Image (cartoon, rainbow, N blue to C red):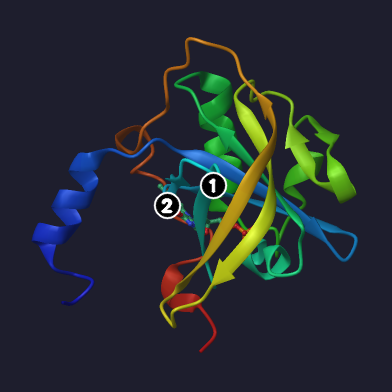
Amino acid sequence: MSSGDHRFVQLMASLDSPMAIVTTASDGQQAGCLIGFHSQCSIDPVRYAVWLSKANRTCRLAVNAAYLGVHFLEPTAGHRQLAELFGTVSGDDIDKFERCAHQQGPEGLPLLTECANRFVGRRVAMSDDGSDHVCFVVEPITITSQSPMIPLRFHTVEDLSAGHDADEAPT
Ligand SMILES: Cc1cc2nc3c(=O)[nH]c(=O)nc-3n(C[C@H](O)[C@H](O)[C@H](O)COP(=O)(O)O)c2cc1C
């Protein structure tokens, strides 16, 4: 099936995924990007999967990182700005963390203080099936939550253009 099959594109868009920001740190550097590809993937033990584009700086750092921060976005003006910052520009070009409030998690992991619903995940597996995204599976170890939480969904950010298109991935 081609990536441009409009029935598949429409089907996925109609799921209207909740949006999140993944952060990571390795080799003394920090990175983070907006994601729509993420889900709980095991109940016992609890596991969560995120898929990062090989074109993204965040993926390049995550490959060597022990922890990922997963931040769930809500439909507020502040979170819309975070979605734009982390989704439309690359850490290859600017320092995103100079432009948003954050605190340090384990091993220098940046945690976005404006996101009240987030967790720190310890990486337990990584899989590359040769597609343009890499799957990282994490065990949630520190959870911060504030309920009720209403997710910011894909349809409210579908106007954004990704900082790196997936087809920029190195072969
Ligand atoms: C609506 C939307 C959804 C996105 N979903 C993902 C995703 O699931 N995984 C991913 O790796 N990148 C995703 N991106 C792309 C990255 O957020 C974007 O390319 C970012 O600028 C990469 O930053 P980096 O190079 O600093 O990692 C998405 C972007 C947008 C606008």
* Amino acid bearing label 1: Arg
Total numbered badges shown on the rendered structure: 2
Sequence-first disc among 2 and 1 = 2
Residue 80 locus on image (x, y percent): 51, 29
Residue 60 in the image, given as x and y percentages of width and height = 67, 70
Q: Is residue 134 left or right of residue 120?
A: left
Q: Quadrant of residue 18?
A: top left
Which residue position is annotated with label 2?
37
Is residue 83 visible from the viewing direction of this image? yes
Residue 26, located in which quarter of the rendered image?
Answer: bottom right
Are the residues at dot 2 and dot 1 in contact (C-beta closer than 8 Å)? no
Answer above or below: position of 152 versus 136.
above
Is 10 on the left or on the right of 118, as rendered? left
Q: Which residue is mark 1?
A: 47
For the point 29% across and 36% down, which residue is it? Answer: 155
Q: Residue at x 59, y 68 (%)?
A: 126
Residue type, label 2? Phe
The Cα atoms of the two marked residues, 2 and 1, are separated by 15 Å
Q: Residues within 10 Å of mark 2 (few under 14, many from 20)?
A: some
Vertical placement of residue 8 versus 23, above or below: below
Instruction: Tell me if residue 7 comes above or below residue 70 in the rendering.
Output: below
Secondary element at tag 1: strand
One can see residue 55 in this view: no
- Is disc 1's CB within 8 Å of ligand 1? no
Q: Is residue 1 left or right of residue 138?
A: left
**Residue lying furthest front in this view?**
44
Q: Residue furthest left?
A: 7
Front position in the image: 82 or 30:
30
Compared across the picture, whether 108 is left or right of 151 comes to: right
Q: Provide the secondary structure element on which disc 2 rests.
A: loop
Whether disc 2's CB lies below 8 Å from ligand 1 is answered yes
Please tell me in which quadrant of the rendered image residue 61 appears: bottom right
